[in-house]
Image (cartoon, rainbow, N blue to C red):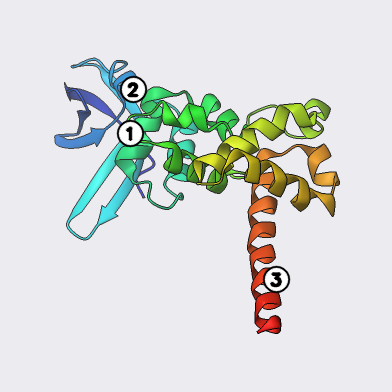
Amino acid sequence: MISFLRGTVAHVGLSSAVIDLNGAGMSVNATPQTLSRLKTGEEGKLFTTLIVREDSLTLFGFATDDEREVFDVLLSVSGVGPRLALAVLAVHEPEAIRVAAHTGDTKVFTKVPGIGPKVAGRLVLELAGKLVPHGTAGSPAAATPAEASWKPQVVAAMTSLGWSEKDATASIDKALADDPEISFRGNVGEILRTTLRWLGQDGARAGNRVGARG
């Protein structure tokens, strides 16, 4: 694995740069912000992730290790490839992405070109618990927010996945009735997963009731 590159910057383009490593030019894709920090003829360093495909080897570069970490986690979301993950980082700082994933703020992701409500909802669902804002883990304010803080975000995530606002609200209330502690913890991702799991189980119970009557 190539963890980072350090060498003379041979070229800076609109979406990539070439780093001269003792006579070998390594092409690296990066965000405009990262590329703006590189100066042709001067030494540059980029943290990197190598994407291996059947027909290609592609390097993606980042100004900080935190950017690379967020990029790698974004790639774990189904349907998100390296180009889209890089686009997210081109629009938002790593900490903003962490906060959006932790709070279930789908609007942050829909600001990225190529991401609509459905993809944003999937990002919130799959990133929950994987990206945590720095300095918030374990703090009382983060652990026990009021319902008014998290409920609109969970409802928004569910409507982006296809539920109506009315059905989403009712499902959240029913899903948390058996485990109110979840609502006190206020983790948007956890509440969203619990509600979706409850919906699946409730659908199975409904099917069993219909089968029994038949």
Name the spot of residue 187 as percent of width and height, x first.
71, 39
- Marks 3 and 1, the one that precedes in the sequence: 1
Left or right, 186 with respect to 128, comes to right
How dense is the environment of label 1, judged by Cα within 10 Å: few (below 14), some, or many (20 and up)? many
Left or right, 2 with respect to 106, comes to left
Residue matched to label 3: 205
Q: Nearer the viewer, mark 2 or mark 3?
A: 3
Left or right, 152 with respect to 17, comes to right
- Marks 2 and 3, the one that precedes in the sequence: 2
Q: Of helix, strand and loop, which one carries label 3?
A: helix
Q: Is residue 73 above or below residue 178?
A: above
Residue matched to label 1: 61
Residue type at the position of mark 2: Thr
How dense is the environment of label 2, judged by Cα within 10 Å: few (below 14), some, or many (20 and up)? some
Say which quarter of the image contains residue 159.
Answer: top right
Query: Cβ–Cβ below 8 Å for labels 3 and 1?
Result: no
The residue closer to the viewer here, 29 or 79, is 79
Is residue 132 visible in the rendered image? The answer is no
Name the spot of residue 80 as percent of width and height, x first.
38, 46
Residue type at the position of mark 3: Arg
Q: Is residue 199 above or below residue 172?
A: below
